[in-house]
Image: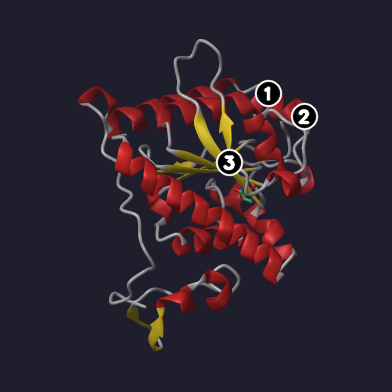
Amino acid sequence: MIEMPIARGKVRAASLHPVATGAIVEPVVEPRATQTLPRVVAIAAAPRSESDSTNSREAQLRALRERHDRECPHCTTSKSHTQTVFGEGNACADVFFVGEAPGETEDTSGRPFVGRAGQKLDEMILAMGLRREDCYIANVLKSRPLDNRTPLPAEVALCGPYLVEQIMIIRPKVLVSLGGPATKLLLKVDTGITKLRGIWTTWIPPQGSGAEPIPVMPTFHPAYLLRNYTVQTRTEVWSDLKAVIQRIAESKSTTPK
Ligand code: URA
């Protein structure tokens, strides 16, 4: 077994399992410069061509954001938010995390997943051997629902298409849907997250869009994980994330992005 130096001396690789160390369940311990994370997947994705460069995707995302803020029938009429939260991250990300809707902290900052659930998501990303900035993170709804309630189907129908456009610009190798609303939108099903989590499914792009289907791994929302802080839930989430790491590694060994 590999020995690796971390903050409190040497430990065996197996004890870096997030459930064992609490990486998913305890406050993040800043990795030291000398720390080696477990089997890190090199994630910086190379664009296919000049016209498909990071700059081009970023420009498309900026244009989409402006159009969304100008015309989204949900966000332009909702009265419960102070600003929209479009999403952020690497325009060429291999992993795209899809959440539900901004909460209070996100509404204040204009950034997705920066409150308590966001800290948990950061820990999950770190445990995968990635950095937040390697990934793309966005929500089904781009504006905070009143009192943080679950998005209504009518709201999802109005705001959801902009998420679909984000996915088609970024074309990640894997979509990770966090919780029920994101999973329901991406998979067009009404099944609960408990039944769907951990099972690979496929996001089917809109007909005629020319986009490719993308594998989806549904998992529990980090806020659910925080509310249900059990070994079982943590183990299940970690199992889902490990499947994502493996899928990306496999796709990198077979296809260029
Ligand atoms: N929960 C979400 O689903 N999204 C956020 O951005 C924050 C909390």
Residue appearing at x 33%, y 79% in the figure: 4
- Nearest the viewer among 225 and 18 is 18
Quarter of the picture containing the C terminus is top left
Q: Residue furthest front?
A: 1
Label 3 vs label 2, nearer the camera: 3
Mark 1 residue CB less than 8 A from any atom of ligand 1: no
Residue appearing at x 66%, y 38% in the figure: 183
Q: Which residue is mark 3?
A: 200
Quadrant in the rendering for residue 138? top right
Quadrant in the rendering for residue 78? top right
Residue appearing at x 68%, y 42% in the figure: 144
Identified by mark 3, the residue type is Trp
User: Can residue 132 be seen from the camera position used here?
Assistant: yes
Of the two numbered discs 2 and 1 on the same chain, state the one appearing first in sequence: 2
Q: Which residue is mark 1?
A: 158
Q: Is residue 176 left or right of residue 1?
A: right
Q: Which residue is mark 2?
A: 153
Identified by mark 2, the residue type is Pro
